[in-house]
Image: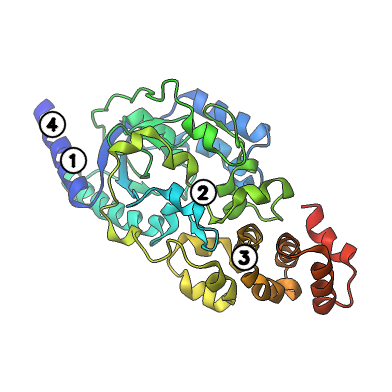
Amino acid sequence: MAADASRLRNWLNDAAMANGFHSVHVTAATLPETTGTHLRQFIAQGFAGDMRWLADTAARRSQPRAMWPDAVSAIVLTMNYGPDHDPMDNIRQPDRGNISVYARGRDYHDVIKGKLKQLAGQFAARTTANVKVFVDTAPLMEKPLAAQAGAGWQGKHTNLVSRDAGSWLFIGTILTDAALPHDAAETDHCGSCTSCLDICPTQAFVAPYKLDARRCISYLTIEHKGQIPKEFRHAIGNRVFGCDDCLAVCPWNKFAARAAESKFLGPQSMPALADLLRLDDQEFRQKFAGSPVRRAGHARFLRNLLVAAGNSGDITLLPLIEMRLRHSDPLVRGMAVWALAQLVDAERYQIIRSEHAPGETDDDVLAEWAEG
């Protein structure tokens, strides 16, 4: 039996690598009760912000077997999406739209799920076991499972860190009713380092290992449905979809490699703000088809672009900002007002406002964003 288990594990390792994964680890399809406790505390403290689905699925999310009672083992796979440059260089290009590294190519959900299904099918054919695959869309807590399986540890920025791949890792999971030998959990190797906490532009970490999503730029530019609060707008800089700062400064990235999967190295790296601001809804959908960026929707993406435009110091963007002063969505109108106010003096601001919204007073328009 031990020999059979060893042969199966060797096959699993080889098959995972052949399917493009960086690592494969196995653990029990259960998590400690403390995992659910931490999740409930996160929600109770309001740190989840608009992500109400976390509360709605908290009971199922706390234990993998709550989703599939027959699950015995969790096969946790990672895939590297490391950039070929230092993403911190991107924040020094104020005329460009800074899109998070993970969202610059094809949507990782689609890419990894296809590979997971192929590997799971091979595993099922070899073992006759039942399998289910998960990639960050179902209520399964992948990061705690990955740490328990030994794929890495959850760093002080709450993301998975690997000693041989750094912070640039996607996670996919195969649950199975097969009993497999388990790998040892990884220990925490953050030590006294606080680089990820110190770099955060909006001070979103209330303590090591504890994130207030309501202050996180990734949350604000992707998940948040309302106006971006004024206190965070300047700190956002040119980040129009997500933020990589806490990942990029992790010292363990010295072992990270460039993504091997070409689909993660797409064309959306640092488009010009001017080009992005010109997009209408249909053009937005076409440009970002198959990309995670599309999930924000055109109006919220315009909201983010206008924050970046206001931070750019680039007065050549004024005509493109003025175009959005009559947008149908108050998210866009309000942020266009704010962006305008960042780039022109008070006199010019009043002239432009009167030209574009002669039937509205400044107080009416400013109210749309001042409370945001």
Between discs 3 and 2, the one toward the N terminus: 2
Residue 106 location, quadrant: bottom left
Q: Nearer the viewer, residue 354 or 12?
A: 354
Nearer the viewer's eye, disc 2 or disc 4? 2
Q: Mark 3–mark 1 contact, CB under 8 Å?
A: no
The residue type indicated by label 2 comes to: Cys
Q: Nearer the viewer, residue 99 or 261?
A: 99
Compared with 360, 198 (above or below) is above
Disc 1: which residue: 13
In 3D space, how far apart are the residues under numbered discs 2 and 4 (Cα atoms)?
A: 41 Å
The residue type indicated by label 1 comes to: Asn
In 3D space, how far apart are the residues under numbered discs 1 and 2 (Cα atoms)?
A: 32 Å
Between discs 3 and 1, the one toward the N terminus: 1
Nearer the viewer's eye, disc 1 or disc 2? 2
Disc 2: which residue: 243
Q: What SS does tag 3 mark?
A: loop
Q: Residues within 10 Å of mark 2 (few under 14, many from 20)?
A: many
Compared with 60, 111 (above or below) is below
